[in-house]
Each structure stands twice: as structure tokens, then as C-alpha cells.
Image: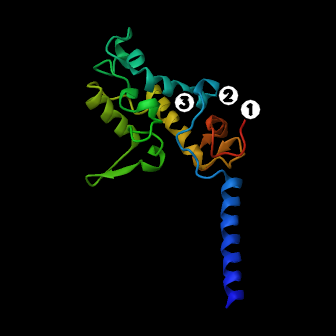
Amino acid sequence: MRRGMIGFVLMLAGAAAGLAAGYLLWGGRPNWYAVRDVGKLPADRQNDLAAYGYQLIINTQRYLGPDVADAAMRFAGNNLACGNCHLRAGLQPFAAPFVSTYTTFPMMVDDRVITLSERINGCMTRSMNGRALPADGHEMEALLARRNVFHDKCACWSTSPTHHAFGQPATIHWLLDEGCSQGLS
């Protein structure tokens, strides 16, 4: 009886030690909201788009607001920025974060599939009191490239120049603080 109890305690201690070692080796739970400065991304087309998308989020009124010099770029009907609702450029937990958008869209709403582009345009027309961005335009492409930064948290194992599953350049992985064991320079 005593031997069985000692064996059980030793087995329990071994399991606890293994679990603790696992957390130490793999870094515990990843912080999905930790992202580096987009200004430090290596220069390439996709990263430039992601950096522009970041600027669109934090300075929407400067690029798309009602006072923009180029009247064709006046998509927002007010001087709000996306960052007024999506705090810390979509990285603040519980403040309309962008972190899960890659896995959330497309989504089914009222028996209809909506894409992230449609959701962004919903913000532009309702929250921003403006008009929709062209679905194939440069600004929409930049906002979607910014969104792709977050999905790469799950795909950082890729070492190929192109992440074939999503068609995204692997250099965007460098933006992440956590979740990747390797960075690209």
C-alpha cells in the first residue's frame, strides 16, 4: 500500500515536472497582441502595404478624411480614425481587436457570407459616415495586408520565400515579437 502511494506521488511529481518543463521550453501561452513597430519591417511590397495599412488605421483622417486635398480620396465623412474604435491599431484586447480577423472572415451573417473587405466598407459607410473603398483599390489592399500580419502568428514555421498556404511573403513574419522561434532579417 505504501509503495503504491509513493509510486503515485512520484508519478504525479514527474507529470508536474514535465508540464513545467514544457511551459519553459515553449514559452507558455503566446501573446497574440504583441507586435513590433511596422516601420522596422524589411522593405518589400507586402510589408510596405502593411505599413501603409497601419498608417491608414491610426491616421485615417489624414489619408481618407473629408479634408484630404485629393477629393477622390475623401472616403471618410468625418475626422475619426479606425484607431478610435480599434485601440492601439487593433491590438488592445476587448477593444475591437484585429487579432482574430484572419480566422473570423469570411463569416456568415444573416444567411449571407461577408468578407473582410465588406466588413471594412461597413465601417467606412456607417462608423466613418463615408463611402466604400474600392474592393480592389490600394487602400483596401493595404488594410488587408495589415490584417495578414496577425495571421502569421500561426504560420511562422514557414521558411520559404512565399508562404504558399496563404500566398503571403514570409518576410512579414519578422514583425512578430512572440510565437516564432526564428526571425528574418
Crowd class of label 3 (few under 14; some 14 to 19; many from 20; radius 10 Å) = many
Q: Closest to the observer: 155 or 85?
A: 85
List x then y, in percent, for residue 37: 59, 27
Assign a secondary structure to mark 2. loop
Assign a secondary structure to mark 3. helix
Mark 3–mark 1 distance (CA, rounded to whole Å)? 17 Å
- Look at the image and tell me in which quarter the C terminus lies: top right
Residue in view at x 38 percent, y 29 percent: 134
Q: Closest to the observer: 52 or 33?
A: 33
Label 2 belongs to which residue?
Answer: 42
Label 1 belongs to which residue?
Answer: 185
| Tag 3: amino acid | Ala
Residue in view at x 64 percent, y 25 percent: 40
Mark 2–mark 1 distance (CA, rounded to whole Å)? 7 Å
List x then y, in percent, for residue 49: 55, 28
Label 3 belongs to which residue?
Answer: 50
| Tag 2: amino acid | Pro
Callouts 2 and 1 close, C-beta under 8 Å: yes
